[in-house]
Amino acid sequence: MVDMSVGGTRRRALVSFRGGGFAPVSITWISVLFFVLLIGFWQMASSLGWVSGLFLPSPLRIVDALQRLALSGELTQHVTASLARIGAGWAVGAVLGVVFGGLIGLFSIWRSVGVPFIAAMFPIPKIALLPLFILWLGIGEAPKIVTIALGVFYPIAIGTYAGVDNVARTLIRMGQSFNMPFHHIAFKIVAPGALPSVLAAVRISTSIALILMVSAEMIGADKGLGAFLLTAGNLMQTDNLMAGIVVVAAIGLCISGLLTLVERSMLSWR
Amino acid sequence: MGFELAIANVSHSYAKMRALEDVSVTLNEGEILAVIGPSGCGKSTLLGVVGGLIAPSSGSVSLLGETPPDTLNPYTFIFQDFALLPWRSVAGNVGLPLEHHRLGVGERKARVADALARTGLSEFADALPKQLSGGMRQRVGIARALVVKPAVFLMDEPLSALDAQTRELLMDDFEDIWRREKTTGIYVTHNLDEAIRMADRVMVLRRRPGRVREIVAVPVPRGERRKPAAQGALRALHEELWANIREEAKLADREVARG
Ligand SMILES: Nc1ncnc2c1ncn2[C@@H]1O[C@H](COP(=O)(O)OP(=O)(O)O)[C@@H](O)[C@H]1O
Ligand SMILES: [Mg+2]
């Protein structure tokens, strides 16, 4: 083709790019740098005496405290007690949540009873019920486990029946069109179809469980991270207090990482 | 010998909406009936009634005579959106409708392998649906239907979710399968070309309520429709049918959804 603009009479306007942005990504070195700077600044502020060690212990003192608590075996005791509670409470709440959520998702009677019941009970802060459970069940492990279980139950029940509701109608019709029996449709089509929603609810429920665990242990326990935090606070041992908080955060991160692995392996078909 | 599928005076209403009214037609064994009509004329409803997924307000559907003895599911659907379980492999999806039948492991495997082979899917047995193209997904849907050896195939716009080229390829596949053995089926489509190419007879539905407007036989046997000599007759049929559908398609097109 002949370039007609050779004469220089025609104006040339380049197309300018305008499709950028709106695609944020996580850049690892920036994330790392941020935390390094934050902790470095914190250490510096403590070392230079800008903040009192009593109000905010330095990162190094927190590490010291962690080491001391770990070596003395104190930390293990508290962590073990806490993990046992959260494990038991979470397991009971999750199993009941999945079962009842599934029943609500599949049967009109359960739905009629369950949905308004959950709507009424879900908003209650479960920790407010702990004194009642202590009254009913005594001051052992049971009231704390029940409180955690109850906190876990509702989001998982809701996530389960929402997941069942969201299973594509045509998949169920497909099962029926092949004469699959009810329980085959329920377990081979509905259950796996609801799984993503259930796992999303599981993720939410674990942070609720962690909050309830610490709160319940603050109200009535001599072992456990909540009890440890409360004692450290009362005795103004802020380095122990911060060490306890770090441990709670670490437990939360571990659970979250574990869930990511579970999701990757169970939902790889997505 | 053989069987007949009798659809007798089927009417169906959704609440106040009359979707189907007094539809009657009889299919002979080995016959493919295409059902065409504009969107909303009750094609899916009719197929749902035939397949036992929708209880009609009145009328009945029955099979008269002997169905093939190895049929596990006489009325078997092929779905527009494929209806595959995304968490199951191709072989897992194809084997699903066998799992509640008492079959030996050997027979189960043999049936799945045979269905996969007949749809060209053998080498994809372990793939997940998300890894497959739309055309391959629908082939899985076809294999899953073949595996139960249906008496009647119920196909609800099986190619509508596919692009034009893939549609051509799958029509070839259907024709191959139908040529190799006698297949009875109802093929719902809104595509006139598809209907004229695939069916022995074409049933035209009108809308609101869905009634049978006419049932016409395609004048050329399915195997000979590619021949130049057949083109005149097929084009004439196309024009005749389009003239009938056009007005209603226009109405459907200009309709505002309420509710
Ligand atoms: N479950 C339903 N409830 C109420 N109305 C429906 C339902 N399914 C279909 N209809 C209505 O019935 C009519 C026929 O629908 P359908 O059989 O799906 O038509 P087609 O498959 O020909 O597009 C449409 O007007 C549609 O809106
Ligand atoms: Mg339809």
Image (cartoon, coloured by chain):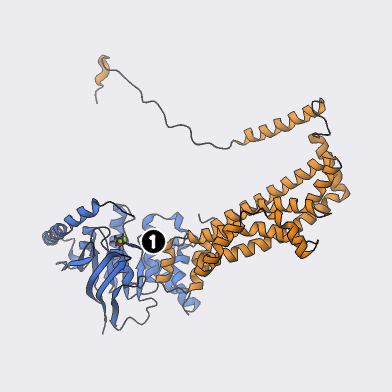
Q: Is residue B229 visible?
A: yes
| Front residue of this view, candidates A1 and B172 | B172
Q: Is mark 1 within 8 Å of ligand 2?
A: no
| Front residue of this view, candidates A194 and A231 | A231
Give the labeled residue for mark 1. B82
Chain B drawn colour? blue
Query: Which element type, helix, strand or loop, lies under badge 1?
Result: loop
Chain A drawn colour? orange
Say how many tags the image has: 1
Quarter of the image for residue B23 reads bottom left
Is A149 situated above or below A235?
below
Image x and y of residue B44, in percent = 31, 64
Quarter of image, ligand 1: bottom left
Work out which residue is located at the far top of the displayed protein and give it: A8
Task: Identify which residue is drawn at 59% across, 63% down.
Answer: A98
Chain ID at mark 1: B
| Front residue of this view, candidates B242 and A2 | B242
Task: Identify which residue is drawn at 29% across, 80% down.
Answer: B63
Work out which residue is located at the far right of the displayed protein and give it: A72
Image x and y of residue B29, in percent = 25, 77
- Within 10 angstroms of label 1, few (less than 14), some, or many (20 or more) residues? many
